[in-house]
Amino acid sequence: MIIGSIFGIAFDAIRANKLRSSLTLVGIIFGVTSVMTIISALQGMMDSIEEEISVLGPSTFMVSRMMMAMSDEEFREKIKRRPIQLEAAEMIAENCTQCERVSPRVFASTRVKYRDKALRDVTVMGGTADFIHIVDMEVELGRFHSYEDDLYRRRVVFAGAQIVEEFFPDVDPLGKEIKLGGVKYTIIGVAKKKGEMFGESQDDFVVIPLSAHIRQWGQPRRGVYLTIKAYSVDVLEDCMDEVRVILRSKRNVPYNEPDDFDMMTAESALDMINQFTRITRFALVGISAISLVIGGIVVMNIMMVAVTERTREIGIRKSIGAKFKHILWQFLFEAVIITFAGGLIGIVLGFVIAKTLVSLIGMSISPSAAAIILGLSISGGIGLIFGVVPALKAARMDPVKALSYE
């Protein structure tokens, strides 16, 4: 009952001093909003990146001359590596006992045309029929190319959604012919739309049989990229070890030298991205946290003013029996109520701003329970921490001096 009474007194005091309470609220809203915007935006981007990388599946990994470089020195060292040739992919497919599927891929960029319409710099990927069974690429219409298409070097194409939307907005695209670099290809399938990431479309691509790609663009001078699927997650490490041994043997890498190629699973890719962005995330959150400290100082200063203004009230309450802890809790409750309310508003504003910013680069976010709990904990904690000094000052007042205060 005493706690309820103290809470009621604190709430009435906040309502009676609307201007002072509003100023305190604004300081907390600003701080929590900035923190929540950064946390929500970063979480949204990482979730989107994780979703994209997860198409590899838990038992799949990639192999290439160079995946990622964390420094200029590492990049300069990796760029000197020899490309991985198509023969290496064939050797892995023949000798790797734990590999369920192996799909070499090559890339080119060209002009895609249909009648009088054209798109420039469209990514053309050449891959084997196994590729669709390795990655989670969904088919919207038609089919992916088959082993026979690859064997006979057929000029067939599996198109991204943007290509179809541009050339065939109201027409069935299957069976239509488009030109890739001046050569006619027949559309046999359409990929499900994926949207944008970091402002770039993920649907402006076409996939053709690897043999057709080599037929038109020749042997890849930059080598091939390998996407490999192990039989299960349990044998993934053994599968990667087998591939490593085969590649080192094929590329004549001495036993005492490191690999001259990179291998990466979806999990390791996320770990590298997290490592690369960790310092940036800490720096951004640290900078935004400064605004919270400023908000806390605002709370403390305004509460100190409130204590001074209500000196006689404190004296009267003490003279009729209010104890040290009652006065202490009253002013702490006032600070926490204000900062908690500011936290709620800041969480909503932060999420809305983050959603707007993230949508500009083609991503989306959803409310995070961890972020909401963190925001409320921070705002409530600020009220407790920065409200302690004013509350102690009020609780320690001599009632005689407080009653005589003018």
Image (cartoon, rainbow, N blue to C red):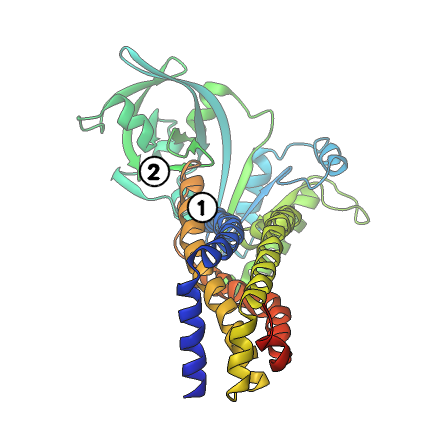
Vertical arrangement, residue 72 with respect to residue 2, above or below: above
Q: Quadrant of the C terminus?
A: bottom right
Q: CA distance from mark 1 to mark 2?
A: 43 Å
Q: Residues within 10 Å of mark 1 (few under 14, many from 20)?
A: many
Q: Which residue is mark 2?
A: 146
Vertical arrangement, residue 167 with respect to residue 290, above or below: above
Q: Which quadrant holds residue 223?
A: top right
What secondary structure is found at the residue carrying circle 1?
Answer: helix
Residue 169 versus residue 103: which sits nearer the camera? 169
Q: Which residue is mark 1?
A: 354
Coordinates of residue 266 in the picture (x, y in percent): 53, 51
Q: Which amino acid lies under the numbered mark 1 shown in the image of this protein? A: Ala
Coordinates of residue 338 in the picture (x, y in percent): 47, 63
Name the residue rendered at 64%, 70% in the picture: 389
Q: In terms of sequence position, does the residue under pointer 1 or pointer 2 come before the other?
A: 2
Q: Which amino acid lies under the numbered mark 2 shown in the image of this protein? A: Ser
Report the side of 92 relative to 130 (left or right).
Answer: right
